[in-house]
Image (cartoon, grey):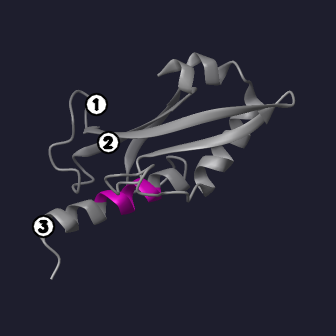
Amino acid sequence: MEDDESKTLSVITQHNDMFRTSFGKCKDLKGQIVQTQGVAALGPIAAMIIASKIMRYDNFTEETDPYGEHDFGSVIIHHNGVPITVWWKIDLYDADYERGAEDPEDTARTARVMTILLPSEH
C-alpha cells in the first residue's frame, strides 16, 4: 500500500506532467505560463519551438528531478544558429496565486505557474 507522502508525490507529478504536456491547456488544472524578458526577446518562432520542446520533455533523472515532481527541465533551441539553453520551472500556489499551495493534490485549491527563463536570468 502506498503511503500518504508517496501518493501525494504521485499526484503532484501526474498533475505537473498534465500541465506541462498540455502547455497549460489542461481544463482540470488551473495555471498560467509566464516567460522572462530574455525568453520573450527571442521572438514568436522561438516561443513555439520552446513550447514544443517543453511539452515533449521527458529527461527526468535523479540529478535533474531529485524530488520526483517533474517540476523543472532544461531544453536547448537554436536561435540564429546559436544553441540557447532554456529552463522551465513549475511552482504550486494557492488558487489566488498569493502563497504556496496548502494541498497540492486538490486541483480546486491549487494553481500552477510555469516560468520559462534563460539560465542567466535565474
Q: Distance between the residues labelled 3 and 1?
A: 25 Å
Confirm whether the magenta stretch covers residue 106.
no
Task: Please identify the dominant SS of the magenta region.
Answer: helix
Q: Name the amino acid, label 1.
A: Tyr
Query: For the residue marked with disc 2, what is the amino acid?
Result: Ala
Judging by the rendered image, the residue that carries numbered circle 1 is 97
As drawn, the label of residue 18 is none
Residue at image coords 45%, 37%: 32
Labels 3 & 1 near each other (Cβ < 8 A): no
Q: Count neighbours of disc 1 (C-alpha within 10 A) and say few if under 14, some if 14 to 19, many if 20 or more.
A: some
Circle 2 or circle 3, nearest the eye: 3
Of the pair 73 and 114, the residue shown nearer to us? 73
Quarter of the image that includes the N terminus: bottom left
For label 2, count other residues whose C-alpha is less than 10 Å away and answer few (under 14), some (14-19) or many (20+): many
Dot 2: element: strand
> Of the residues under marks 3 and 1, which one precedes in the sequence?
3
Question: Can you say whether 64 is above or below 9 in the image?
Answer: above
Segment tinted magenta in the rendering: 12-18
The residue drawn where x is 73% and y is 42% is 49
Circle 1 — which element? loop
Q: Do the residues labelled 1 and 2 touch (CB within 8 Å)?
A: yes
**109 and 71: which one is in front?**
71
Above or below residue 7? Residue 48 is above
**Residue picked out by circle 3:** 4
Query: Does residue 56 lie above or below 116 as drawn?
Result: below
* Residue 96 position by quadrant: top left
